[in-house]
Image (tube, rainbow, N blue to C red):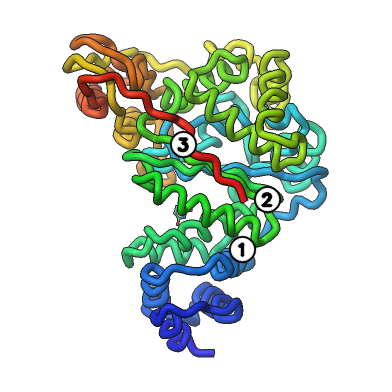
Amino acid sequence: MRMVDIIAKKRDGNTLTKEEIDFFVNGYTKGEVPDYQASALLMAIFYNDMTPEESADLTMAMVESGDQINLADIEGIKVDKHSTGGVGDTTTLVLAPLVAALDVPVAKMSGRGLGHTGGTIDKLEALDGFHVELSQDDFVNLVNKDKLAVIGQSGNLTPADKKIYALRDVTATVNSIPLIASSIMSKKIAAGADAIVLDVKVGDGAFMKTEEDAVALAEAMVQIGNNVGRRTMAIISSMEEPLGYAVGNANEVREAIDTLKGEGPEDLTELSLTLASQMVVVGGKAETIEEARTMLEEVIKNGKALEKFKAFVKNQGGDDSLVDHPENLAQAKYHIDVVATESGFIESIDAENVGVAASILGAGRQTKDDEIDLAVGIIHKKKVGDKVNKGDVLAVLEANTDSVDDVVKRVQDSYHYGKDEVHTKLIKRIITA
Ligand code: URA
Ligand code: CA
């Protein structure tokens, strides 16, 4: 087999076989296929797309390029969730204990935040002592015992994806639906999920700017998952503003705890319940989304979801008294108001820019090895749809320095106003096989 023939075949709009896709992925991972040939093939895929079968073959070739986590010793259908990237998005901390409270096992591999997005592990570390360095045996035992554990990312998961993604980044081939879909799905499948629930964000603050593109990406991922025997569903959710009120680490743990008690922000509650309902259905514990939702609302009301969160924190070395006393989580020294510079109805809040603002305060990393400040962040007081007058408090910065003029300005600039009240629909679509 020759790489040049594979490139020509895709260039001419034909369909690649599994053998041809394997030849490319294996050869490129091993360094036998040079960057220029891989680049040419990626650009041909960018222009000519892939069939669902080709996308599934590409996904599985990347899965098989490195370690695969074996969760066979965990009883039940292991369900994972993936979001294409939100700001202030603490849904994992809410829905993991929620679904675990209904005996759906959650064996989750999570990452840290980089740039303007937060990471689940960083947030969890706000609970003093919490750690994700578990042995494979401890991880499996904890999930069997309490249905929930989180472990850090393994070093050699989908090396093919790492290499291909880095090449796409510099060859203008990131924004291709089959390439994004196979990249995301390969990581979830290699991490051992039997079933996958996807939250595809749409809007200015998201990767996919239009609903049409978001639906196409969601459909591609759902099709890949179901083609390779992993039950997969997706939702399309709006990213016209950060999720919830809090953006940061300790403050988002507080927000997650509120939500588990049924006292959280409306958008975070709705998104968590929608995704959790899908997880309960794909996890085989309910027949319909509606039935699952009723069950989930019940475990919030009767306190089981919060109890599950406490057990999970304790199991992984965290101080579970903080769950009952979230006011004792790290607090910043200064609280600085950000006020509205004009009057009107809030139309949107640039989530990415707010993420950057929180990151400048110290809530995020600029490089992989940066230390983050768990106490700092931003609390929104006004959200999309609210009417404000000039001088009203839009948000409060939680900072450990009081020289934050640039951050105040950045948050002010993130708010966009209109004359009329806008209603954005948070959950735009549900995509099933
Ligand atoms: N996220 C991924 O993991 N891969 C992509 O290709 C795009 C976003
Ligand atoms: Ca939040």
**Disc sitting over residue 236 in the figure:** none
Disc 2 residue crowd, few under 14, some 14–19, many 20+, Cα 10 Å: many
Circle nearer the N terminus (1, 2):
1
Q: Residue at x 26, y 18 (%)?
A: 345
Percent from the top left, x then y, of residue 374? 46, 26
Residue 99 or 359: which is nearer the viewer? Answer: 99
User: Contact (CB < 8 A) between labels 1 and 2?
Assistant: no
> How far apart are labels 3 and 1 at the CA level?
30 Å
Q: Residue at x 39, y 66 (%)?
A: 167
Q: Secondary structure at mark 3?
A: strand
Left or right of 431, for residue 378: left
**Label 1 element class:** helix
Marks 3 and 2, the one that precedes in the sequence: 2
Q: Is residue 47 left or right of residue 297?
A: left
Instruction: Identify the residue under disc 3.
Output: 428
Residue displayed at 48% across by 44% down: 200
For marks 3 and 1, the one nearer the N-term is 1
Q: Amino acid at mark 3?
A: Lys
As drawn, is 245 to the left or to the right of 55?
A: left
